[in-house]
Image (cartoon, grey):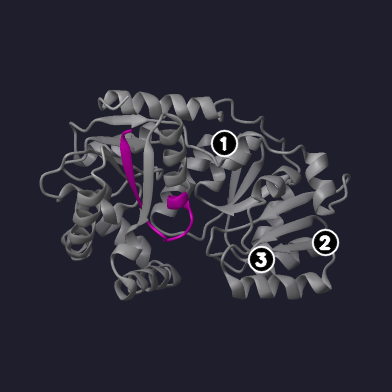
Amino acid sequence: MPHALLVSGSLGHGHDVMARACADTLRERGWTTDTVDAMALLGERSGAAGEAVFRRLLDLPGVYDAFHFSALRPGARIALLADAAARSRLVPALRELTARQRPDLVVSVFATATSAVNRLPERGFKHFVFCTDVTPHRLWVQEGTDLFLVTSEVAACAVRRHRPDAEIAVLPAPLRAPFYRPPGRAGARAELGVPPDTRCVLLMSGAWGLGPLARTAASLAAAGPHVLAVAGRNAELERRLRRAAAREPRLHPFGYTERIPALMAAADLVVTSSGDTCSEARALGRRMLLLDVVQGHGRDNLQHELELGHADVTNAHPADVVRNALAALTRPEPAPSLGATPDAWRDGFGAALEKAGLG
């Protein structure tokens, strides 16, 4: 059987979701797969330091914006030096992995892995890069990649900025399997204890729970709607949400949970940061209010979601979120995305494999 190695990255949760979608589809087509975390391959100290630096950049207003737009996007020297430093640690680990596994295909779903995979000597495999950002930056786009997988024509243009001759496949964004068969709104509300005749908002902001979500959740619930607030892997945020819920009965707190499809099905509005959650909300036909809390590529993605429609944007201050959410709840609900089907993703990914001679 053919074998694929998928290289993800544990910054947030989105990379792992995309890696899993690729792996599931490959296994359905008779492949074996293995998924590795590029941050772990860097080594415990280097991986932890890399995550700490990235978190710190996001905490400093404007700093990651500056780095993304002036360095990462065009491929300025400082970005290439950072990439080279990570590559020096990744190449030996990936060389050992590929020598042992002998994959037919390597799929990089994390930018840090891209140049390291392309520097491996005596490559006997095809290399795909899969990026769901609307403008893949320079570190995603390296010489030696056989096929770039993106989810919009805008992203394809961003790839061609650095490689005009690149082979590119534009695919529908894959969803986690439960989003293809979500529960109905009435059933989801009954399961969650949300009254059927009230307004309901899902509030979340990635696996890290970015922004002042606890204060926002409490203020929004006090304004009338039931609020399903998800902390992700942010343990301190979960504690704050549970303390707030003890005072506000319309606030329903959650930590990291696999119940997002039910939470989204129960909601009339999804308040979230830009990212793969947006594709999930569109698949279920939910209007969005986007929190402007992710700098750099997050602002690119946010602008694209606004252009697609059925979305609004707000500053992260609780009063602004409440005012915008209450207004958004009065607007029409969109229809579910017609292209959000498992066949659309599988057919697109299958065509990409065939394009590379791996079908």
- Residue type beneath disc 3: Pro
Please give left or right for residue 56 compared with residue 288 in the image: left
Q: Position of residue 46 (x, y in %)?
A: 29, 72
Q: Position of residue 281 (x, y in %)?
A: 61, 42
Q: Earlier in the sequence, mark 3 or mark 2?
A: 2
Estimate the spatial distance between the alpha carbons at disc 3 and disc 2, rounded to whole Å.
16 Å
Estimate the spatial distance between the alpha carbons at disc 1 and disc 3, rounded to whole Å.
23 Å
Q: Which mark is residue 250?
A: 2
Residue 310 appears in the picture as rendered: no
Residue 298 appears in the picture as rendered: yes
Q: Which residue is labeled 3 in the image?
A: 318
Please give left or right for residue 4 compared with residue 265 in the image: left
Looking at the image, is 294 positioned above or below residue 288?
below
Q: Position of residue 90 (x, y in %)?
A: 23, 60
- Residue type beneath disc 1: Gly
In depth, the one of 190 and 200 nearer the eye is 190
Q: Earlier in the sequence, mark 1 or mark 3?
A: 1
Q: Earlier in the sequence, mark 2 or mark 1?
A: 2
- Label 2 sits on a secondary structure element that is loop
Q: Which residues, given as a range, are shown in magenta?
A: 1-16
Please give left or right for residue 255 compared with residue 340 in the image: right
The answer to which quarter of the image holds residue 184 is top right
